[in-house]
Amino acid sequence: SSSSKSTGSSLIHYHADFDSFDREGRYRLRLGDGRQSEPFSIGRNVYTRLVPLMLQYFETQSCGEYTPAAHGPCHLDDGIALGGPRDGQKIDATGGWHDAGDYLKFVETTSYVTALMLTSFLRYSEAFPHRKKGGQLPELLAHAKVGLDWLHKMHPTPDEFYYQVGDASDHELWRLPEDDNPNKNSKWKPRPVLFGVGANLAGRTAASFALSALLYKPYDRAFAAKCLKSAETVYALGLKNKGVLTTKPADFYPETSWADDMEWAAVRLFEATGKQDYLTQAIEFSLLAGASGREASVYNSHALAHFALYPHVAKKDKARLLEYLKEDAEAVRRYSSNPYTLGTPYIWGTAEAAAGAAMVCRGYGLLTKNEEYLTLAKRQRDFVLGCNPFGICCLIGSGTRYALNPHHQIANLKAIELTGAIIGGPANYALYKGNAIELDSLEYGVPMQTLPTDPQELRALSVYQDSVGDYIANEPANDYTAKFLLVAAYDIATTYAAKLDS
């Protein structure tokens, strides 16, 4: 079946649904004039192949002694404490993941990414390979441990918390990570490790540790116990610092909420310990957090926290949490009256916003068994995978058309494909003007000569270019990729369950 929508111009967009096809294989669409689409696959396992791609991206992002195929050991001298009881002293902040296309390391994103990985495993473990080659842990837990080990280093004692390695000077030089040492760069110095804590960072970190206490227990009881202890101490820091701490500079990740993160931490600690006080606090924080009124993102954990809390509360609180989730999902639905059913505006990181829109719609749809929102979640997923005005798959290495020139130093300097990364995707034209980025290589979408001249039309225009200099549409990010990992895990698990039923 198909449906059509007009954009108000001469173009008509059709949505074709292949759910009823029962023959697996590779297909093309052929138009009446003989033109053909790119080939695409129909089958039960089409989403299964996405997970190994995304995990490969996190391999590339690894920092420290571990050597992925893409680069050598790096940043082994991280770092020197800036602030706190060790101010000016050496502190071990090695390991973790480089953030996005550069080499800074943030608790802001690492805590979120790790929590999403663990949530994916908690809910959809069948979507992931059981063992990493040569290891004892399930593959996803092995990847998440990279983030967890680094988060432990950022919380070395019950009273200490460090939130960032490096500063804005990281963006001044385009280089490989292994070149950040005195032998390659005579001006190189160990990077600053910034001291400070806010309830937003403490909450997400505590949620990650509490989830780990549950999930690693069957494989490594000592590590699980360590995670539980850290979850409780960092949560206590959050209770003492009820406010937001952003990255430095703040505009790198300008978060504004914290109660949602503390709610998430409290409910996961309740699950890990059975202590009623944590559940009481989770309910209190949920009242403070309310609804976000938008898609899930690194800036808000509202939907994730409310969804986790829902099974543990009484009927009255369940109804309240559902109203919060409905408000978020409704915000997505209101935006979705466009040919591609995209439930967010075109922003900096439209692909990750679409993944976040899928998360809130799916969460509400699953709890209420509302097919409209479950279908809307699929449309957000499809936008990321190429059902967008530019026919570009925002997951590198998937499909036939994806970014070949991402804004990523390792990929660019090594001339390699950045397999598994989710890029920002199509963005609003106004962002380019505001950031003085030239639109010089529009390979997909509107050719440059057809850009409208009317200012109102320009403001509404979405654009995409596959350019290494474009850090709006073409830069990958860890949080982008982890969000889509959770989205894809649901689809794989659902397919797996359908196989068992058939």
Image: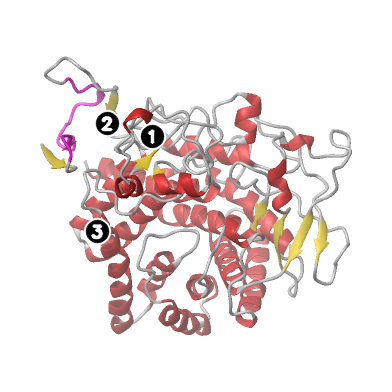
| Residue at the image position 43 percent from the left and 78 percent from the top | 286
User: Label 1 vs label 2: CA separation?
Assistant: 18 Å
The kind of residue on which mark 2 rests is Gly
Q: Horizontal placement of 167 versus 359: left or right?
A: right
Q: Mark 3 highlights which residue?
A: 333
With respect to residue 172, does 68 lie above or below?
A: above
Percent of width and height locating residue 451: 34, 35
- In terms of secondary structure, where does tag 3 sit? helix
Q: Mark 3 or mark 2, which is nearer the start of the sequence? A: 2
The kind of residue on which mark 3 rests is Arg
Q: Is disc 1 in contact with disc 2, using a CB cutoff of under 8 Å?
A: no
User: Label 2 vs label 3: CA separation?
Assistant: 28 Å
The kind of residue on which mark 1 rests is Cys
- In terms of secondary structure, where does tag 2 sit? loop
Q: Is residue 442 visible?
A: yes
Quadrant the C terminus occupies: top left
Number of the front mark, 1 or 2: 1
Q: Mark 2 highlights which residue?
A: 43
Quadrant the N terminus occupies: top left
Residue 214 image-quadrant placement: bottom right
Q: Is disc 2 in contact with disc 3, using a CB cutoff of under 8 Å?
A: no
